């Protein structure tokens, strides 16, 4: 299972990347706004840090302009995945860009039928948004499971990138279902290491170690 970090915060990316946990990065216009940085500059900086795919999102709504934006974003680095929305214009842009050999991440996916369209358009990644479905009382995990079943039924090689992850349980459930990738904010990824029994166990080991009076270094 691959971990992408869902942020344009350079310090957070560097910190997680140093642990070997970052297989890629996803950004979107809201995350670029949050970073306060220029999209081309910050995306280049991210691509210099991370070897895996770095998603950069187009902002046009018409296919021709999306394609032009995608080609410009793709020039930033060889590991760019151009992110396009799941609209007919986005699917057309996906088809053109993926035919050119460009990685494409089709984003804002909220149904299994949308995921089928993205796979047929040649998407490298499909991004179903779990948290935003949960927000409106639907089951985001059910969508991940449906897409897994359908892609396996037909041998689609588009990778399922479980997105809009809000909790550590979303990560576990995505892994159980067999999502290829999860993208999560740095805070959620960091929480994956937490367990009260780990803290308690470490505390008692360190207390006993202090009583031995020994030092390793
Ligand atoms: C994915 O690529 C998106 O950037 C992201 O996961 C959206 O998450 P949100 O619904 O928490 O904004």
Image (cartoon, rainbow, N blue to C red):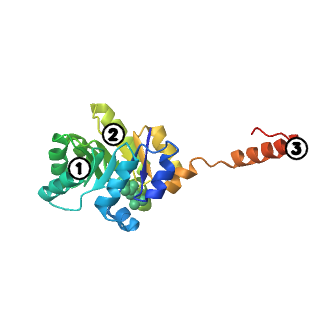
On screen, residue 9 above or below 179: below
On screen, residue 13 versus residue 59, left or right, reads right
The structure residue drawn at horizontal position 49% and vertical position 42%, both measured from the top left corner, is: 20
The N terminus - image quarter? top left
Q: Left or right: 198 with respect to 113?
A: right
Secondary structure of the residue carrying numbered label 2: strand
Residue at the spot 57% in from the left edge and 52% down from the top edge: 191
- Judging by the rendered image, the residue that carries numbered circle 3 is 211
132 vs 24, nearest the viewer? 24
Q: Do the residues labelled 3 and 1 touch (CB within 8 Å)?
A: no
Which residue is label 1 attached to?
Answer: 74
Tell me if residue 137 can be seen. Answer: no
Residue carrying label 2? 159
Residue drawn where x is 31% and y is 60% of the image: 41
Q: Which of marks 2 and 1 is nearer the N terminus?
A: 1
Q: In which quarter of the image is ligand 1?
A: bottom left
How far apart marks 3 and 1 lie (CA) works out to 58 Å
Instruction: Give the crowd class for mark 3: few <14, some 14-19, many >=20 residues within 10 Å.
Output: few
Question: Looking at the figure, which quarter contains the C terminus?
Answer: top right
Q: Position of residue 6 (x, y in %)?
A: 41, 54
Q: Which percent across, then down, holds residue 178? A: 43, 37
């Amino acid at each position: 299972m691959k971990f992408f970090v869902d942020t344009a915060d350079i310090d957070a990316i560097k910190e997680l990347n140093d642990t070997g946990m970052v297989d890629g990065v996803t950004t979107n216009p809201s995350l670029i706004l949050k970073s306060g940085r220029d999209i081309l500059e910050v995306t280049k900086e991210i691509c210099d840090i991370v070897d895996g795919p770095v998603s950069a999102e187009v902002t046009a709504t018409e296919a021709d302009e999306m394609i032009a934006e995608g080609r410009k974003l793709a020039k930033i680095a060889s590991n760019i995945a151009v992110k396009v929305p799941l609209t007919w214009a986005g699917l057309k842009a996906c088809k053109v860009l993926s035919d050119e050999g460009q990685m494409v991440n089709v984003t804002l996916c909220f149904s299994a039928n949308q995921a089928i369209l993205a796979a047929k358009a040649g998407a490298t990644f499909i991004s179903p948004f779990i948290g935003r479905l949960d927000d409106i009382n639907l089951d985001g995990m059910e969508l991940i499971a449906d897409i897994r079943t359908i892609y396996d039924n037909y041998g689609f090689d588009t990778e399922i990138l479980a997105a809009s992850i809000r909790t550590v349980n979303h990560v576990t459930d995505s892994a159980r279902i067999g999502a290829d990738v999860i993208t999560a904010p740095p805070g959620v990824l960091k929480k994956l290491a937490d367990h009260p029994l780990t803290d308690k166990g470490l505390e008692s080991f360190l207390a006993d170690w202090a009583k031995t009076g020994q030092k390793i270094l």
